[in-house]
Image (spheres, rainbow, N blue to C red):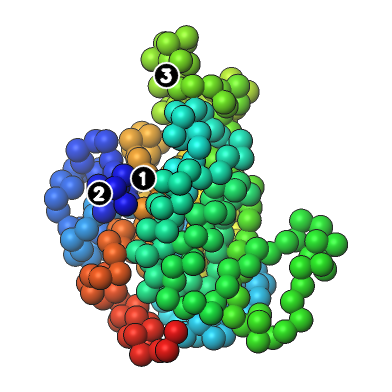
Amino acid sequence: MAAVTSHRAIVYTQSHCWSNNNSKVDKRTDNVNMVSVGDNYASRRKFGLICASRLEQSSAMAPVQLPSNHNNGHTPKKSSESSLILIRHGESLWNEKNLFTGCVDVPLTPKGVEEAIEAGKRICNIPIDVIFTSSLIRAQMTAMLAMMQHRRKKVVPIIVHNESEQAHMWSQMYSEETKNQSIPVITAWQLNERMYGELQGLNKQETADRFGNEQVHEWRRSYDIPPPNGESLEMCAERAVSYFKDQVVPQLTAGKHVMIAAHGNSLRSIIMHLDKLTSQEVISLELSTGIPMLYIFKEGKFIRRGSPVGPSEASVYAYTKKLAQYRQKLDSMVL
């Protein structure tokens, strides 16, 4: 993938990230914070990929009921460890044209398709039980294309239609075997991109020429100032993080392995929550298109592991004993 030159899923425009006591931590250090869900205790663990900040509290609720997935090569309900993969969608047609996209439903470019496929290759040995995406096609395309690269070829991602009783009834499966070979894909508007209001569809450079660079930068990068008739990052975070707590955390708590394919600002909001970034720190946070970010959820704690750099590097799958065992099982299977 020629367009992506870095294996980092997350880039700070500042030269430092911050520790729990607000002291600077150089990016070259290898400290990763580990924080319990439900408390503020943080401990540090060595890791050589990325610098992480503090993790914020998450509420653990009863897991939502999803189709069973017993034949994925692991037993998630009995596991004390689960994976969380975050992926920003591949390049969209309006990313290519440098237009404000927001909640306009624009598909991927050929480059975006390649980015989604490459993302899938990076996570092809990591177990996935449940997929969450936004209601926008670019995120859904990214999720589907990524899953097509997974080594469990017999496992099929299937969008769950619960928008109406009729849609739910008409999309039912009546084969237990087929159900067990499927991965539910949950779409949620709460994971949509930040709504850019009257900027949507406008060229970013032309908008800067019209309103001034300072004003456009304030609309784009401030935390609590929305564009005309649009959302601020704070407003986007309110819906995205609430959904994450209510729907995603219970799946992880139940031992499910989760992938979220969404957008720059909704994922920035979730990462702000997980890493407990301040409103000033999050505005410096950049996410590359099509680069997966891996977290491990174990015993109520989120541990950020950075970005899986490719299926050929064994170290990627030695983050934990269970991930290493899962890859070994895939290696031994006839796919």
Q: Position of residue 240 (x, y in %)?
A: 55, 47
Q: Which residue is mark 2?
A: 6
What percent of the width, then of the height, locates residue 188? 63, 52
Mark 1 lies on residue:
288
For residue 283, side relative to residue 174 (left or right): left
The circle on residue 205 is 3
Q: Secondary structure at mark 2?
A: loop
User: What is the quadrant of residue 162 in the picture?
Assistant: bottom right
- Asked whether the residues under the numbered discs 3 and 1 touch, taking CB atoms below 8 Å apart as contact, a structural biologist would say no
Mark 3 crowd level (few <14, some 14–19, many ≥20, 10 Å Cα): few
- Residue occupying the point 54% across, 41% down: 193
Spot occupied by residue 149 in the image (x, y as percentages of width and height): 44, 67
Number of marks: 3
**Image quarter of the C terminus:** bottom left
For badge 2, the amino acid type reads: Ser
Question: In the rendered structure, which disc, 3 or 1, sits on the residue that comes first in sequence?
Answer: 3
Mark 3–mark 1 distance (CA, rounded to whole Å): 20 Å
Is residue 195 left or right of 25 when viewed as pictured? right
Left or right: residue 56 compared with residue 65: left
Mark 3 lies on a secondary structure that is helix
Check if mark 2's residue and mark 1's residue have beta carbons within 8 Å: yes
- Look at the picture and state if 286 lies above or below 175: above
